[in-house]
Amino acid sequence: MFVARSIAADHKDLIHDVSYDFHGRRMATCSSDQSVKVWDKSENGEWHCTASWKTHSGSVWRVTWAHPEFGQVLASCSFDRTAAVWEEIVGESNDKQRGLSHWIKRTTLVDSRTSVTDVKFAPKHMGLMLTTCSADGVVRIYEAPDVMNLSQWSLQHEISCKLSCSCISWNPSSSRAHPPMFAVGSDDSNVTYGGKVQIYEYNENTRKYAKAETLMTVTDAVHDIAFAPNLGRSFHVLAIATKDVRIFKLVPMRKESTSTGPTKFEVQIVAQFDNHNSQVWRVSWNITSTLLASSGDDGCVRLWKANYMDNWKCTGILKGDGSPLTGSSGQPSAMSTVLGSSVQSSQNALNGMSAGSQKSQHLTS
Amino acid sequence: MEEVDVEPTITNIPAISDGKHMGFAWGPGDILVYETRYKASGSGCSFIHEIRKDEDIYSPILRKLFNESHHIFVGLQTIREDLPSKRDVNAQLVRKNPHSVFYSDIHFITLFSGTILTLICFLLKVSILLAIELIWNLCEVLFIDAAPAGSLLLHLLDWVRLHKADVDEKAREVLQSESPAEHRDYWDVVVSYVLQGRLEEVRQMLVKQANLQPAARSMYKQMDTLLSKMPFYNPGGTQTLTEFDVKWRHWHEEVDRCLQDNSFASNRHLELICKILLGDEDTLLDHKELLGTWYHFLVTRLLFCHPTVKLTELHYYAQSCMTMFLDSRSVPEPLDNILLAAFEFDIHQVIKECSIALNNWWFVAHLTDLLDHCKLLQSHNLHFGSNLREFLLLEYASGLFTHHSLWQLAVDYFDHCPEFGRVYLELQIERVPLETERKALKVLRVCEQRQMSEQVRSICKIMAMRALRNNRLGSALSWSIRAKDAAFATLISERFLQDYCAKGTFSDLDLIDNLGPAMLLSDRLTFLGKYREFHKLYGEKRFREAAKLLLSLMTAKIAPQSFWMTLLTDALPLLEQKEVSHQSYLERRVTAWCCTLFYIIFKSHYSIHCYC
C-alpha cells in the first residue's frame, strides 16, 4: 500500500472523525475546533474544501452523511450535549464558480444531558431516521416524517441502556427476514460486570425496540462497534473495538410461531486479535465486508481479512513513522521485490534496457 | 487463500508520529488516515492521507490487459457444457503473440514518460507482466495441452524459446557485422542456439566459421552431419514413440563415439557443442549465463538426455535441475516456486504462490477460472474448486469496480459468479458515482437488465432529489416517474402547479405534454397533465372539449384545494363562449351547478368577493 495523496486538513485542533459520503466523492471532517469541513473530490482526484463552519460549542466527536436519496444532509454530535442536522443549500452561481457551498442548520437535538458520543443514520429503507447515543446511557431515535422539511424531527424512541454509551451501529441489512436492529457499545470501565455490548431489535407488534441480546463476554470498555454489510447471509457479523479486536457472528435461532419476543441469537466469536497491545479505538468494515480496519493505542491501523476458508489474519499495517512529508505524491512500492532477480534475468531484451534493469535491481535490494 | 506464511506488509505514513493514534475512514478503493488522539485533547493535526493498494488499476498497460482478459473470460463462460475437450477451450483462447500487448504501449510510454521514476515503475510492471506470461504459458502447456511423451518436450522447447528471444537480438547483431565468424559474441550465439535445440540456425552459423578455417573443413563437416541427423519427434508422422526413441539413442551413441574418438579435440568450441549434444550436466552448468534460468537448463537437459519425457516424470527433473542450477547461496524466489509447483502439477500450490507473490488478483482469478473450466480443479481434488474460483473472481472484480470506467468489465465477472455475484453487484453498483445523467443512465441500464428493481429505484430517486434541489423540475419529474415514486411525483407536481400560479405559465411543457400513461402514477400528476391539456384545448379554441375536460377535472376530485379558485376562474369565461352555450341544457346545468358548488365551498373557506 502507498500514500497516494496527502491533504492539508487545516483544522485548528484535533480531527475526531472523517466520513466519506455514499459515493466517495465528498468527505466531511470534524474537530475539537468545533467546526465541520466539507471537501469535494475533483475529477483529477484533488480534494477541495468547499465549506467550513462552526457547528457546536464544544468538540465535535462524529460527523455522518445521510443517504443521497435524502439530498445532501449531514449530522454531527458534540461534547456540548447536542446533535445537529445540516443541509446543503444550492448557492448563487458565483459561489459555485468559486467552488463554495453553504450548509444551514435544520435542527438541533437537545434532549441529551451529557456529551453525545455517536450519531448515525438508520438504513435508508427505514426512512430518514437519526440515532444518537450519549454518556448518560440513553439511545435516542429521531425521525423526519417529511423528507422535504428537515426542520421537523420527532423523538420516536428513547432507550435507556443503563451504562454510558460510546458507539452505535445499525445492521445495514434491508432484508425482510430480519427486523431493524442496532448494537450499542458502552465504555463503562467497571469490568466486574459484562454486557458492554447490547443488541436491540424492533418489534412490529409493540412498535418498540426491545433488547435481544447482551454480549456478556465483553467486559472491558467498548469504544467502537460495526455491523458488517450483510451480503445476503442469514447471520450477522459484528466487529467490536475493546481491549482487543473481536468479531462476533450472530446466528438467529428459529422462532416459534407463538413467540412474540425478540429474536434469540446464537453468539459465536469468530476472531479475536490483541495485536494493538492495548485499547482498540475504532473498527470499520469496507464496502464489501471483506476487510476490517482497526485503530489502536499502538498508533497503527491494521487491516484484517478472511481467506477462502474463513480464517482471519492481519494483511496490512499502517504505521506513523514521524518522517516529514515530502512534496510529491507517492509511488507504488517496488512491485518486483516479490518476484526477485530471476525476473530480470528472464526478461526479454527490450532494446537498451540493461541500464534500466540495473536500476530496478537497486530498488529490490 | 492460505496466506499463513506471510507477514503483513507495513506501510509507513509520514507526518504522523510514532505512537500517536491514527484515525481512518474507508473509501471506494482507498482508506483515509489521519492523526488524532482518542479520549484526549491535543494540538492540531495537519494532514489526512489517502492510502491505496499497489494494484494500480489506473495504469495504461494494465488497462489493455484487463480489457483483453475480460474478452477472453466472457468467451470462456459461454462455452457450452457439452464441449468436452480442453482443446476446444484452448481454441477459444485468443493466443496472440503475447508481446504485442506490451510493445505498442512501450513506444507510447517512452514517448510520454516524464521522470526516470515513472520509467522504472513501468519497467517493473513490464517485468511482472512478462513473468505472468511465462507462468500462464507454462500452465497452458502442462495443464491444458497436457501433451503425451514426445510432443511434451516440443511444447516445452517452444515455451523456452518464446521467453528467451534475446538470442535473436544478439544473432542479428553478429550477422550484421562485417565478419560474423570473428565477432566476439559469435560463439555465444552458436552455443545459445544449441541450448535451445535450434540446430538449423547452428548449422548456418557454423558454415561461416567453416569458411574461415579451410583446414578444419572435415571437422566442421562432421559436426554438421551430427547436427543434421538429430532426430526430432514428429507428432503428426507415422513414427511411433518407440521407434523415435530407438533412433534417438542411436544418434546419441554416435555423438558419444565422436567425443570418445576425440574427433573434435582440436577445436574446443566444437568439442563443447558435442558435450552439450550429449546432455553433459557439468558442461551445461558451465553455461549458466547463457541459459539464464534453471527452467531453461531443465528443458535443455531433457532435450539432450530424455526427449521422451512424460508429464508425470517432470517433477523429478524439475526439482533436481533447480537445485543444481541455483548454487547453495541463493534462495529460490517466488517465481521459481510458482514454476516448480506447476511442474509438480500442484495446481493448488501454483494458485497459492501466485496470490502471495502478485499484488493484483487479475492473474490468479483468470488462471483459476480457466482451470475450473477445464475441469482441472476438481480432478486435482479441490472439492471446493468452483468456490475458490468465485472467491478469486469476486476479489478481482471488486478491485475493478472502483475505477471510473473499468467497473463495466467487473459487471460481467459478477454475472458469472453464481453464489455471491449478484449480491456483490447490488452492493457495489449503488456506489458508482453518478456525476452526469449519461453515467446514471449507463448504470441504470445495467440494473434494469438484471431486474435489480431496488437499485433502479434508488438511483432514480437520487437523481430526482438532486434535480429538485437544483430547481430543475422537469428533470426531477422524469426521474421520479422512472423511479415509480408516487409520493415524489406528487410533490413535484405541486411545485409545478405552484409555479403556474405564481408565473401564469408552465415550465417544461414538452415533458408534461408527453406524459402518457406515466400520468397515472399519482393523482396530482394526473391533474397536472390534464390541466395542461385543458389549457392546450382552450388555446386551440376547442372550447367544447375544454369545457368537458374542465368539468371532469372538477368532478373527479383530483384537483388540489388550493387550485379550486383557479379552476373556477377558468370556468367562467368558458361559460360565455358560444360553443359552450350551445351545449345541451343538461350539460350547462351541470356546469353551472358545479361552479356554484365550488363557489360556495370556496367562499366558506375564504372570504373573497365573487364576481359572478
Image (tube, rainbow, N blue to C red):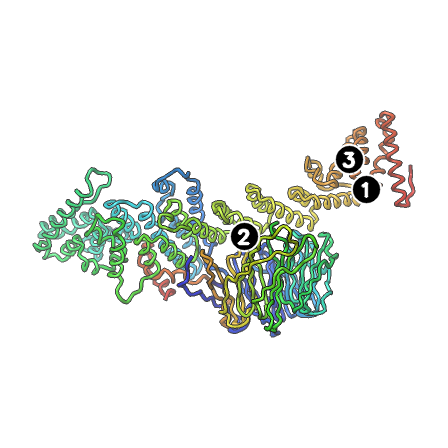
Letter of the chain that mark 1 sits on in the rendering: B
Letter of the chain that mark 3 sits on in the rendering: B
Q: Which residue is mark 1?
A: B563
**Residue B442 visible from this viewpoint:** yes
- Does B562 appear above or below A236? above
Horizontal and vertical percent position of residue A106: 73, 59
Q: Nearer the viewer, mark 1 or mark 2?
A: 2
Q: Residue at x 21, y 43 (%)?
A: B233
Q: Is residue B464 left or right of residue B580?
A: left
Q: Earlier in the sequence, mark 3 or mark 1?
A: 3
Asked if badges 3 and 2 are on one and the same chain, I answer: no
Q: Nearer the viewer, mark 3 or mark 1?
A: 1
Q: Secondary structure at mark 2?
A: loop
Horizontal and vertical percent position of residue B167: 26, 53
Q: Which residue is mark 3?
A: B535
Q: Secondary structure at mark 1?
A: helix
Viewport quadrant of the C terminus of chain A? bottom left
Alpha carbon distance from label 3 to label 2: 55 Å
Residue type indicated by callout 3: His
The answer to the question of whether label 3 and label 1 lie on touching residues, with beta carbons closer than 8 A, is: no
Residue type indicated by callout 2: Arg
Q: Which residue is mark 2?
A: A233
Residue type indicated by callout 1: Phe
Q: Is residue B115 left or right of residue B513?
A: left
Alpha carbon distance from label 1 to label 2: 51 Å
Q: Residue at x 30, y 46 (%)?
A: B146
Horizontal and vertical percent position of residue A278: 53, 72
Q: Secondary structure at mark 3?
A: helix
Q: Nearer the viewer, residue B172 or A340?
A: A340
